[in-house]
Image (cartoon, coloured by chain):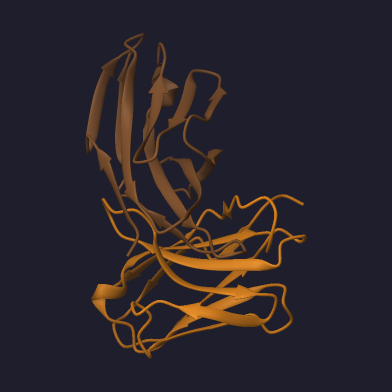
Amino acid sequence: EDQVTQSPEALRLQEGESSSLNCSYTVSGLRGLFWYRQDPGKGPEFLFTLYSAGEEKEKERLKATLTKKESFLHITAPKPEDSATYLCAVQRHTGANSKLTFGKGITLSVRP
Amino acid sequence: DTGVSQDPRHKITKRGQNVTFRCDPISEHNRLYWYRQTLGQGPEFLTYFQNEAQLEKSRLLSDRFSAERPKGSFSTLEIQRTEQGDSAMYLCASSFQTGSPEAFFGQGTRLTVV
């Protein structure tokens, strides 16, 4: 069974204080690893897809990286508006796009 | 197209009542997924459709739950004889069948069973 573990559960940063969020996974044949952002009371918003070890993707203050066992979401000089829950999910390789298995998420709070 | 749309956004119901939620996916997407999310947890897979065919159901989906996608466009999720444990956010997502694997989510329907 596919498993995704995210750590820490919660992270509080001062504005400008860079940090990393961790996502460890086990999956039988990885099709893709996904990062989503979720604001309170809303649906997840897609951020990145990573397909293979060594791949990196960037968007504004966020950079996602992937190894064979884990992924990191690096946040550089965060701002209060980056406060949200960040979800990691994996998709198994089945020949076609299939369901996602999510972790519990990491709640990030950025203080001004 | 403005993305995945879900209706209603909020639903409060009494225990034992039936409820139905609607999801309108991104029009070009032929895959549609339902997930359930409780407080402090990530979304959990319930079921998904490819066009009008329901291809997979999670063991979380008890016989009180039923989902349809009659014409391969919008989908409905019905919960019969609701229980307090059904209180959760019900999320719908859609994607292409092949190619780009990203699933895009709607804003969810928050169900509260009292």
Please tell me which residue lies in front, B43 or A4.
A4
| Quarter that holds the C terminus of chain B | bottom left
Specify whether residue B98 is in view. Answer: yes
Splitting the image into 4 quarters, where does residue A80 fall? top left
Left or right? Give the position of B77 relative to A71: right
Residue A87 % position (x, y):
39, 43
- The reply to whether residue B114 is visible in this rendering is no
**Which residue shows up at 64% across the image and 57% down it?**
B4
Q: Nearer the viewer, residue A41 or B26?
A: B26
- For image coordinates 40% across by 44% down, the residue present is A88
Q: How many labels does the image show?
A: 0
The residue at the point 40 percent across, 76 percent down is: B58
Please name the residue shown 40% across and 20% down the image.
Answer: A75
Residue A44, horizontal then vertical, whole percent = 48, 47
Instruction: Indicate the position of residue A69 as horizontal and vertical percent values.
Output: 34, 41
Q: Where is residue A89 in the image (x, y as percent from the top left)?
A: 42, 49
Q: Chain A is drawn in which colour?
A: brown
In the image, residue B85 sits, relative to residue A69, either above or below, namely: below
User: Is residue B39 shown left or right of residue A43?
Assistant: left
Image height of A4 relative to B44, above or below: above
Q: Could you say which quadrant of the image residue A28 lies in?
A: bottom left
Against B70, is B6 above or below?
above
**Chain shaded orange:** B
